[in-house]
Image (tube, rainbow, N blue to C red):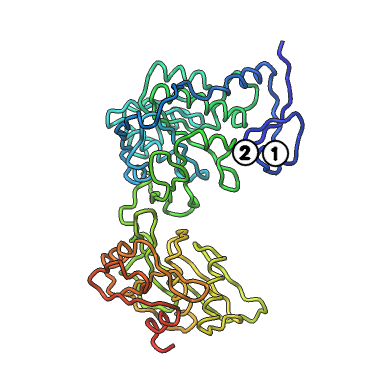
Amino acid sequence: MSRLKTVYRCQSCGFGAAKFLGQCPSCQAWNSLVEEVVEESALASSKSRSRLLTDFSSEIVSLSDLKPETTLRLPTGILELDRLLGGGLVKGQIALLAGPPGIGKSTMILQAAALLSEAGQKTLYVSGEESLDQISNRAKRLNVSKSQLSLLSETDLTKILAALESLNPAVLVLDSIQTVYHPDLDSSPGTVAQVRECAAQILRFSKNKGIMVFLLGHVTKDGSVAGPRVLEHLVDTVLYFDSERQDAFRVLRAHKNRFGPTDEAGFFEMGASGLKEVKSVSSLFFDGSKAGEKPGRAISVAMEGSRPILIEVQSLVVSTKYPLPRRMATGLDLNRVLVLLAAMEKHLRLRLEDKDVFLNLAGGVKISDPALDLAVCASVLSSAYDEPIAKDMAIVGEVSLLGDIGSVSHLEQRLKEAAKMGFKKALRPGGNEGNSAPAFESVPVLDLKQASAAIFGGK
C-alpha cells in the first residue's frame, strides 16, 4: 500500500525537502519551496525515472573521429520566427515559447502549425486549455481552418504519448506544458514535479523519434517561466514575448538557442486575423512623413541582432518648483539616462537641477543599445535649448563618463539604413574611421562639445 507524503519542492531548481525552508539549499532562492502531496510509491517511481533523462546513450569516441552532419532545417513559414530559430526547426529540437497571457502565443503557434501542415509536414496540435470547437473557431478567425492540421484536446501525458505513437507526426505543438499531468504522480498539473516529469518524458520521446516540438509555457508575475528552472535547461530553445499585450506590436526574443543566434528579435503586429510579420521595422518606430523639426526629437539607429532599426528619441525638459526634479525614461534604462544627464551637466555646463527630464522611445519599444547615447543627449539638449534638430540628421554614438564619443559596432549598416530612409546627414563617432559611410554627409565627433557644436552651432 502506498502512503501520502508531504514534500516541499523548489520551483526554481526542483530540490525536495521534508520540511519547509525559507531558502533553497540548492539554488539559494528565497521562498521558492512549495508544498506537494505525493504518494510514496509514485515518488519512488518518479525518482527512478528521472535518473535517465534520455535513452540515446553512446560509447566514448574522439571528437576528431566524428564527421559533422549537414543540419537540415524545416522553415515554419513565418519569416520572423525562422529568423530567431536560425532558419527553421532542427530534427528533434524542442522549443519553449513563453509570454504573458493574451500576448499571442497560441495565435502564432497555431498559424505556424497550419503552415507546416500545408507544407506537407504531419503536425499534431495538442491543447490542454481549449476544446476542439474553440480551436476551430480561432482557426476560422485566423483563416487557417482549411488546413489538414491534426488536433487533440488532452491533458493526460500517457494518452498524448500514445497519440504520438499512432500518428507519428513530424511536429508536435503542446499548449501548454503547465496543463499536462502524469497520472503516476499525485500532485496537481503545473506543480514542479509534474512539469519536470512531463517535460523529461517529452524530451525522451522527441529525441528518440526525431520529432520537432513546440512547448507553450506560462509566466509568473515577474515574467519568468512558471515551473522549475530545469524546464529551460531541458529544452533546446527558449523564446519570450517581451511586450505588453496592450501594445499593437509584439517583440519575440530568443533567450536560449542551441541551434541558432540569441541576439535576434522578431517583430509582429497584432491584427484582426492574428499576428502579422513587420517587414519594415524602421517604419514601425519612425514615420519620416510626419517627422518635423520639433525641439526634443532626435533620430538614431539601433541594432537588434543583425538588423538596423531607426529609433526616434523624444525628450521633454521643463522647469519645476519642487526641490527634487523628476527623471523618467520609457524604453531606456533609467540608470543609464541618469549617467548621461550627469555627463552633460559636467562637460556642457548644462543646468538641470531645477528641471524635470522625461525621455521616451517612440512606439513603445525597449532598446539597450549604447549607440543611442548620443541621440539621447542631443534630444535633451534640443528640448533644454528649445531648438530643433535637423530632421534629415541621424545621430549615432556611445557617450562615456568623460564626455567622449565612443565607437559603435556595425556603423556602416546603421548609416546605410539611415540613407535608405531618406536621411542626408549623420553625426557619428570619430573613432569609427574604418567604416565606410554611404554617399551622404557624415560628421565625425569626438566628444559632447563637438557634437553640441555640430548640431546647435555655437551653443
Apparent side of residue 374 relative to residue 336 in the rendered image (left or right): left
Looking at the rendered structure, the kind of residue marked 1 is Cys
In the image, residue 4 above or below residue 398: above
Q: Circle 1 — which element? A: loop
Residue 122 x/y as whole percent: 33, 25
In the image, residue 172 above or below residue 450: above
- Point out the tag, 2 or 1, that comes first from the N-terminus: 2
In the image, residue 142 above or below residue 149: below
Residue 146 visible? The answer is no
Instruction: Report if the CB atoms under discs 2 and 1 are less than 8 Å apart.
Output: yes
| Residue at the image point whose x is 75% and y is 41% from the top | 22
Residue 117 x/y as whole percent: 31, 30
Q: Name the foreground residue: 133 vs 398.
A: 398
Apparent side of residue 264 relative to residue 360 in the rendered image (left or right): left
Q: Name the foreground residue: 68 vs 191.
A: 68
Residue 328: image quadrant is: bottom right
